Image (cartoon, rainbow, N blue to C red):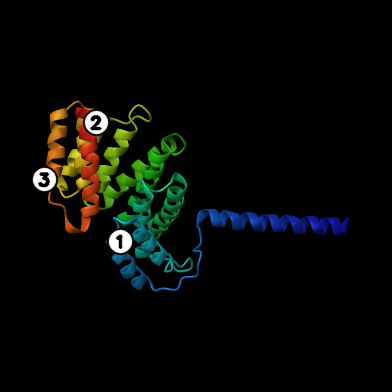
Amino acid sequence: MKIRSAIGLLTLLVLLFSACAMSSEADEEPAPNRPGVEPSKALAESTEHWAARKDPERVRKALEILQTARDPDNRNFEVEAAFARYSWFLGSREQLSYEEAEKVLKAGLEAARIARRLEPDKPDGHFWEAAIIGERAERAPVTVGIVSVDKIRTGMQKVLEIEPGFESGSAYMGLGRLELNTRGLAGGSAERALEYLEKGFDKHKDNAYIYLYLAEAYFATEQDEKAKEMVAKLKAMEPHPDFVPEYEEALKDAEALLKEKTS
Protein backbone atom coordinates (compact mmCIF):
# COMPACT_ATOMS: atom_id res chain seq x y z
CA MET A 1 0.00 0.00 0.00
CA LYS A 2 2.80 2.41 0.88
CA ILE A 3 4.57 1.65 -2.39
CA ARG A 4 1.36 2.18 -4.37
CA SER A 5 0.69 5.41 -2.49
CA ALA A 6 4.18 6.65 -3.23
CA ILE A 7 3.82 5.79 -6.90
CA GLY A 8 0.44 7.49 -7.01
CA LEU A 9 1.85 10.61 -5.37
CA LEU A 10 4.78 10.66 -7.76
CA THR A 11 2.46 10.31 -10.75
CA LEU A 12 0.30 13.14 -9.46
CA LEU A 13 3.32 15.40 -9.04
CA VAL A 14 4.50 14.63 -12.58
CA LEU A 15 1.06 15.42 -13.99
CA LEU A 16 0.87 18.67 -12.05
CA PHE A 17 4.31 19.69 -13.22
CA SER A 18 3.40 18.89 -16.83
CA ALA A 19 0.17 20.84 -16.57
CA CYS A 20 2.00 23.88 -15.20
CA ALA A 21 4.55 23.65 -17.97
CA MET A 22 1.85 23.39 -20.61
CA SER A 23 0.00 26.36 -19.10
CA SER A 24 3.16 28.42 -19.13
CA GLU A 25 3.82 27.53 -22.76
CA ALA A 26 0.29 28.48 -23.69
CA ASP A 27 0.67 31.90 -22.09
CA GLU A 28 3.95 32.74 -23.73
CA GLU A 29 5.72 30.92 -26.54
CA PRO A 30 9.47 30.86 -25.95
CA ALA A 31 11.86 31.78 -28.70
CA PRO A 32 12.93 28.73 -30.73
CA ASN A 33 16.55 29.76 -30.43
CA ARG A 34 18.36 31.37 -27.54
CA PRO A 35 18.74 35.11 -28.19
CA GLY A 36 22.03 35.92 -29.84
CA VAL A 37 21.69 39.48 -31.13
CA GLU A 38 21.53 42.74 -29.22
CA PRO A 39 18.08 44.40 -29.49
CA SER A 40 19.46 47.60 -31.01
CA LYS A 41 21.31 45.69 -33.72
CA ALA A 42 18.33 43.45 -34.47
CA LEU A 43 16.02 46.46 -34.73
CA ALA A 44 18.38 48.25 -37.11
CA GLU A 45 18.84 45.21 -39.35
CA SER A 46 15.16 44.31 -39.39
CA THR A 47 14.20 47.88 -40.29
CA GLU A 48 16.20 47.60 -43.51
CA HIS A 49 14.15 44.57 -44.55
CA TRP A 50 10.91 46.21 -43.39
CA ALA A 51 11.57 49.10 -45.76
CA ALA A 52 11.29 46.57 -48.63
CA ARG A 53 8.07 45.02 -47.28
CA LYS A 54 6.39 44.84 -50.69
CA ASP A 55 8.24 41.54 -50.85
CA PRO A 56 6.81 39.26 -48.11
CA GLU A 57 10.12 37.40 -47.94
CA ARG A 58 11.80 40.55 -46.66
CA VAL A 59 9.24 40.78 -43.86
CA ARG A 60 9.88 37.14 -42.98
CA LYS A 61 13.58 37.97 -42.81
CA ALA A 62 12.88 40.96 -40.55
CA LEU A 63 10.91 38.70 -38.20
CA GLU A 64 13.70 36.11 -38.16
CA ILE A 65 16.19 38.79 -37.16
CA LEU A 66 13.96 40.15 -34.41
CA GLN A 67 13.37 36.62 -33.12
CA THR A 68 17.07 36.29 -32.34
CA ALA A 69 16.79 39.25 -29.96
CA ARG A 70 13.62 38.07 -28.17
CA ASP A 71 14.88 36.97 -24.77
CA PRO A 72 12.18 35.37 -22.59
CA ASP A 73 14.21 36.30 -19.51
CA ASN A 74 14.77 39.93 -20.52
CA ARG A 75 12.02 41.23 -22.78
CA ASN A 76 12.60 44.39 -24.81
CA PHE A 77 9.59 46.60 -25.56
CA GLU A 78 10.82 47.93 -28.92
CA VAL A 79 11.65 44.44 -30.17
CA GLU A 80 8.27 43.01 -29.13
CA ALA A 81 6.35 45.97 -30.59
CA ALA A 82 8.20 45.73 -33.91
CA PHE A 83 7.72 41.96 -34.00
CA ALA A 84 3.97 42.45 -33.49
CA ARG A 85 3.77 45.11 -36.21
CA TYR A 86 5.67 43.07 -38.79
CA SER A 87 3.64 39.96 -37.92
CA TRP A 88 0.39 41.83 -38.48
CA PHE A 89 1.61 43.02 -41.88
CA LEU A 90 2.83 39.61 -43.03
CA GLY A 91 -0.20 37.81 -41.62
CA SER A 92 -2.54 40.10 -43.55
CA ARG A 93 -0.99 39.29 -46.94
CA GLU A 94 -3.31 37.56 -49.39
CA GLN A 95 -0.46 35.35 -50.60
CA LEU A 96 -0.38 33.46 -47.29
CA SER A 97 -2.51 30.40 -46.70
CA TYR A 98 -4.90 30.45 -43.76
CA GLU A 99 -2.63 28.10 -41.82
CA GLU A 100 0.53 30.13 -42.39
CA ALA A 101 -1.23 33.40 -41.63
CA GLU A 102 -2.60 31.99 -38.38
CA LYS A 103 0.87 30.90 -37.29
CA VAL A 104 2.32 34.33 -38.03
CA LEU A 105 -0.55 36.19 -36.39
CA LYS A 106 -0.50 34.06 -33.24
CA ALA A 107 3.21 34.77 -32.76
CA GLY A 108 2.58 38.47 -33.34
CA LEU A 109 -0.33 38.49 -30.91
CA GLU A 110 1.87 37.10 -28.16
CA ALA A 111 4.50 39.78 -28.89
CA ALA A 112 1.83 42.51 -28.78
CA ARG A 113 0.61 41.29 -25.40
CA ILE A 114 4.15 41.24 -24.06
CA ALA A 115 4.65 44.82 -25.30
CA ARG A 116 1.39 45.85 -23.65
CA ARG A 117 2.45 44.34 -20.33
CA LEU A 118 5.89 45.95 -20.52
CA GLU A 119 4.61 49.44 -21.35
CA PRO A 120 0.87 49.68 -20.63
CA ASP A 121 0.96 53.47 -20.97
CA LYS A 122 2.20 53.31 -24.56
CA PRO A 123 -0.17 52.68 -27.48
CA ASP A 124 1.88 50.08 -29.38
CA GLY A 125 0.91 46.91 -27.55
CA HIS A 126 -2.76 47.87 -27.30
CA PHE A 127 -2.96 48.76 -30.99
CA TRP A 128 -1.17 45.77 -32.47
CA GLU A 129 -3.02 43.37 -30.20
CA ALA A 130 -6.36 44.76 -31.39
CA ALA A 131 -5.20 44.93 -35.02
CA ILE A 132 -4.04 41.32 -35.05
CA ILE A 133 -7.23 40.11 -33.38
CA GLY A 134 -9.13 42.09 -36.01
CA GLU A 135 -7.19 40.46 -38.84
CA ARG A 136 -7.84 37.00 -37.41
CA ALA A 137 -11.52 37.90 -37.00
CA GLU A 138 -11.79 38.85 -40.67
CA ARG A 139 -10.25 35.53 -41.69
CA ALA A 140 -12.58 33.56 -39.40
CA PRO A 141 -15.65 35.74 -38.72
CA VAL A 142 -17.73 32.94 -37.21
CA THR A 143 -15.19 31.25 -34.95
CA VAL A 144 -13.06 34.28 -34.04
CA GLY A 145 -14.91 37.42 -35.09
CA ILE A 146 -18.05 37.27 -32.98
CA VAL A 147 -16.22 36.73 -29.68
CA SER A 148 -13.51 39.30 -30.46
CA VAL A 149 -15.56 42.45 -31.03
CA ASP A 150 -15.23 43.75 -27.47
CA LYS A 151 -11.48 43.05 -27.36
CA ILE A 152 -10.88 44.95 -30.59
CA ARG A 153 -13.04 47.89 -29.53
CA THR A 154 -11.43 48.11 -26.08
CA GLY A 155 -7.92 48.02 -27.53
CA MET A 156 -8.57 50.70 -30.14
CA GLN A 157 -10.34 52.96 -27.67
CA LYS A 158 -7.39 52.62 -25.31
CA VAL A 159 -5.09 53.83 -28.09
CA LEU A 160 -7.30 56.89 -28.56
CA GLU A 161 -7.01 57.60 -24.84
CA ILE A 162 -3.22 57.30 -24.85
CA GLU A 163 -2.22 58.72 -28.24
CA PRO A 164 -4.96 59.46 -30.81
CA GLY A 165 -2.40 60.19 -33.53
CA PHE A 166 -0.64 56.82 -33.23
CA GLU A 167 0.09 55.37 -36.69
CA SER A 168 -1.60 58.40 -38.30
CA GLY A 169 -4.88 57.93 -36.48
CA SER A 170 -5.18 54.24 -37.29
CA ALA A 171 -7.27 53.60 -34.17
CA TYR A 172 -10.05 55.70 -35.73
CA MET A 173 -9.73 53.53 -38.81
CA GLY A 174 -9.77 50.34 -36.74
CA LEU A 175 -12.96 51.36 -34.94
CA GLY A 176 -14.57 52.41 -38.22
CA ARG A 177 -13.75 49.07 -39.81
CA LEU A 178 -15.08 47.26 -36.77
CA GLU A 179 -18.42 49.03 -37.11
CA LEU A 180 -18.59 48.29 -40.84
CA ASN A 181 -17.64 44.64 -40.48
CA THR A 182 -20.08 43.88 -37.67
CA ARG A 183 -23.26 45.29 -39.22
CA GLY A 184 -26.07 42.81 -38.78
CA LEU A 185 -23.77 40.53 -36.80
CA ALA A 186 -22.75 42.19 -33.57
CA GLY A 187 -24.46 45.56 -33.50
CA GLY A 188 -22.17 47.36 -35.91
CA SER A 189 -23.34 50.63 -37.46
CA ALA A 190 -22.34 52.34 -40.70
CA GLU A 191 -23.30 55.66 -39.13
CA ARG A 192 -20.92 55.12 -36.20
CA ALA A 193 -18.27 54.02 -38.66
CA LEU A 194 -18.64 57.36 -40.41
CA GLU A 195 -18.18 59.22 -37.13
CA TYR A 196 -14.89 57.48 -36.39
CA LEU A 197 -13.57 57.67 -39.94
CA GLU A 198 -14.50 61.29 -40.57
CA LYS A 199 -12.84 62.29 -37.31
CA GLY A 200 -9.72 60.36 -38.28
CA PHE A 201 -9.73 61.87 -41.77
CA ASP A 202 -10.02 65.42 -40.44
CA LYS A 203 -6.86 64.94 -38.38
CA HIS A 204 -4.84 62.51 -40.49
CA LYS A 205 -5.16 63.04 -44.22
CA ASP A 206 -1.84 61.23 -44.70
CA ASN A 207 -3.41 57.84 -43.87
CA ALA A 208 -4.37 56.23 -47.19
CA TYR A 209 -6.42 53.49 -45.55
CA ILE A 210 -8.78 56.03 -43.98
CA TYR A 211 -9.73 57.23 -47.49
CA LEU A 212 -10.52 53.65 -48.47
CA TYR A 213 -12.71 52.83 -45.49
CA LEU A 214 -14.37 56.23 -45.51
CA ALA A 215 -15.38 55.57 -49.11
CA GLU A 216 -16.79 52.21 -48.02
CA ALA A 217 -18.74 53.87 -45.21
CA TYR A 218 -20.19 56.45 -47.60
CA PHE A 219 -21.34 53.71 -49.94
CA ALA A 220 -22.84 51.87 -46.95
CA THR A 221 -24.86 54.98 -46.04
CA GLU A 222 -25.96 55.58 -49.66
CA GLN A 223 -23.76 58.63 -50.10
CA ASP A 224 -22.31 57.43 -53.37
CA GLU A 225 -21.06 60.79 -54.62
CA LYS A 226 -19.07 61.37 -51.44
CA ALA A 227 -17.64 57.86 -51.78
CA LYS A 228 -16.51 58.58 -55.35
CA GLU A 229 -14.98 61.88 -54.23
CA MET A 230 -13.03 60.07 -51.52
CA VAL A 231 -11.58 57.59 -54.02
CA ALA A 232 -10.66 60.50 -56.30
CA LYS A 233 -8.89 62.23 -53.42
CA LEU A 234 -6.98 59.05 -52.69
CA LYS A 235 -5.85 58.83 -56.31
CA ALA A 236 -4.65 62.44 -56.19
CA MET A 237 -2.89 61.98 -52.86
CA GLU A 238 0.90 62.22 -52.72
CA PRO A 239 1.94 59.27 -50.52
CA HIS A 240 4.63 59.61 -47.91
CA PRO A 241 7.86 57.97 -49.19
CA ASP A 242 7.93 55.67 -46.16
CA PHE A 243 4.38 54.39 -46.76
CA VAL A 244 4.21 53.74 -50.49
CA PRO A 245 3.27 50.02 -50.07
CA GLU A 246 0.33 50.97 -47.86
CA TYR A 247 -0.80 53.65 -50.32
CA GLU A 248 -0.64 51.29 -53.27
CA GLU A 249 -2.62 48.64 -51.42
CA ALA A 250 -5.29 51.14 -50.31
CA LEU A 251 -5.60 52.54 -53.83
CA LYS A 252 -5.94 49.07 -55.36
CA ASP A 253 -8.71 48.16 -52.90
CA ALA A 254 -10.44 51.52 -53.37
CA GLU A 255 -10.53 51.11 -57.15
CA ALA A 256 -11.94 47.60 -56.73
CA LEU A 257 -14.59 48.96 -54.34
CA LEU A 258 -15.52 51.70 -56.80
CA LYS A 259 -15.85 49.20 -59.63
CA GLU A 260 -18.00 46.91 -57.49
CA LYS A 261 -20.37 49.68 -56.40
CA THR A 262 -20.74 51.49 -59.72
CA SER A 263 -20.74 48.71 -62.31
The quadrant of the picture occupied by the N terminus is bottom right
Give the Cα distance between marks 3 and 2: 21 Å
Residue 214 left/right relative to 142 = left
Give the Cα distance between marks 1 and 2: 32 Å
Quick check: 210 above or below 108?
above
Residue displayed at 36% across by 52% down: 88
Residue 202, which numbered label?
A: none
Residue under circle 2?
A: 260
| Type of the residue with mark 1 | Trp
Secondary structure of residue under mark 2: helix
Residue displayed at 31% across by 70% down: 44
Secondary structure of residue under mark 1: helix
Circle 1 or circle 2, nearest the eye: 2
Give the Cα distance between marks 1 and 3: 26 Å
Picture coordinates of residue 186 (x, y %)? 37, 30
Residue under circle 1?
A: 50
Q: Residues within 10 Å of mark 3 (few under 14, many from 20)?
A: few
User: Is any part of residue 51 visible from this angle?
Assistant: yes
| Type of the residue with mark 3 | Ala
Picture coordinates of residue 192 (x, y %)? 25, 33
| Type of the residue with mark 2 | Glu
**Which sits earlier in the primary sequence, circle 1 or circle 2?**
1
**Which sits earlier in the primary sequence, circle 3 or circle 2?**
3
